[in-house]
Amino acid sequence: MTHPHASFDRYATHGGLVLVLNCGSSSIKFALFDAGQSPLPRTPVWNGKVQDIGGSQATYGETGVEPAPLMLDAQEPYHAALAHIRERVLLRLGPRRLAAVAHRVVHGGSKYVQPARVDAAVLADLKTFVPLAPLHQPFALDAIETLLAADPELPQIACFDTAFHHTLPQVEQMLPLPYSAWERGLRRYGFHGLSYEYLSVALPERHGGLARGRMIAAHLGSGASLCGMQGLRSVGTTMGFSALDGLMMGTRTGSLDPGAVLYLMEIEKLSLAQVGHVLYHESGLLGVSGLSSEPRVLLAAESRTDDVGARVRAALALYVRRIVREVGSLVAVLGGLDLLVFTAGIGEHSAEIRERVCRELGFLGIVLDDAANASHAPLISAPGSRLAVGVEPTNEEWIAARHAAAFH
């Protein structure tokens, strides 16, 4: 395996490519875009991912290749996975050079509202936001630090999930805490910004002026949020100070009465670390159902007549209801709604979840075209629907690559 500090520069000739890394706690997704073309193609030249890093079944897969088992150093599996990706990138580059590496960084705080080239000072800044996004921030920063050490001159561009929401009005950013908390930076930041930024580009192409009106985008994946947009700018969102807020998610609670947290600590005597683990890893669909964090698995099990089936049905009902409640709150903020769009893994691929959400939102005048919904069509509302409803695959990697290419 190539040493983790092997240099990309040995391929520095002509024709730049941009590498995008999306680093999570147990996976690294990567994509290579051709920055030599203008405009930047939305489809990567090549992409893939390493999964189950630190687990017993790590796999590596890339474009056109089935995922295969990957043996990783048990002491430093994350660094070993990153080194493996670097090795594959070097082979893929051939005679071309790498122009930049773009990283999805979940939290930029109130300071970073645009992509930033990372140096030692910026990296130190970003480390202070780790407590606000403990599932994602440390891993992205670790990758940046490793690559900075390997190639100090290679631009490392941080693209922030919080940045798209810097247009939120103050009333949407503030928390009802003592004002000194606002002055210290405790506020609602919003997340999934790279996904929403992509929709702000793609949806006007698809839906014209309708997308520039009152729109709600539903990013439904293992993490989930909604964003209310007007004029393609974020004016309201469901995630706030942290990625725990808002919608019920795969393993995260979403919005929760803080009194319940105090109860867990004071009465049930859970430690701070234990409460954090419950909120981030043991709640949501997994916690309520006791079976899985995946709607696909739960939908297949909801017809069971045992206690598991009852819990699964309760979990799915709560998941849908929380989406419906939050859509209603954003409709109030927007003063109405013209377009509702589903995106991300569940939003793009689960016709059943979309149908259940839209059924409960029938008061808005939504009428679905069942065949269009079943085929995940770009427009799934029927001609007689008062409200347009769409499905749009997100493309966070392309947004990050475009930002990085602009730095070069």
Image (cartoon, helix red, strand yellow):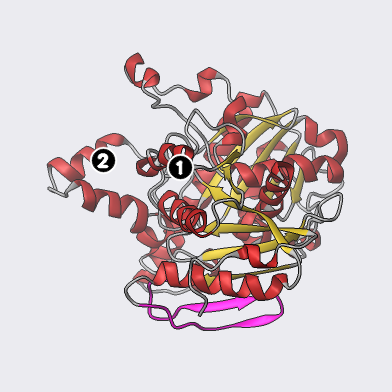
Judging depth in this view, the residue of 377 and 311 nearest the camera is: 377
Which of the numbered marks, if any, corresponds to residue 120?
1
Q: Find disc 2 in the rendering and name its residue.
A: 260
Judging depth in this view, the residue of 342 and 317 nearest the camera is: 342
Identify the residue at image location x=61%, y=60%.
345
Residue 387: quadrant of the picture: top right
Mark 2: amino acid: Ala
Q: Please say whether residue 281 is one of the residues in the magenta stretch.
A: no
Left or right of 338: which side holds 234? left
Identify the residue at image location x=42%, y=74%.
305
Q: Quadrant of the C terminus?
A: top right
Coordinates of residue 7 in the picture (x, y in percent): 57, 65
Which element carries disc 2, helix, strand or loop? helix
The CA span between labels 2 and 1 is 40 Å
Q: Please say whether residue 59 is one of the residues in the magenta stretch.
A: yes
Q: Is residue 387 visible?
A: yes
Identify the residue at image location x=65%, y=67%.
10
User: Which label lies toward us, 2 or 1?
Assistant: 1
Coordinates of residue 186 in the picture (x, y in percent): 38, 27
Q: Magenta region: which residues?
A: 51-73
Residue 70 against residue 176 in the figure, above or below = below
Give the residue at the far top of this rendering. 179
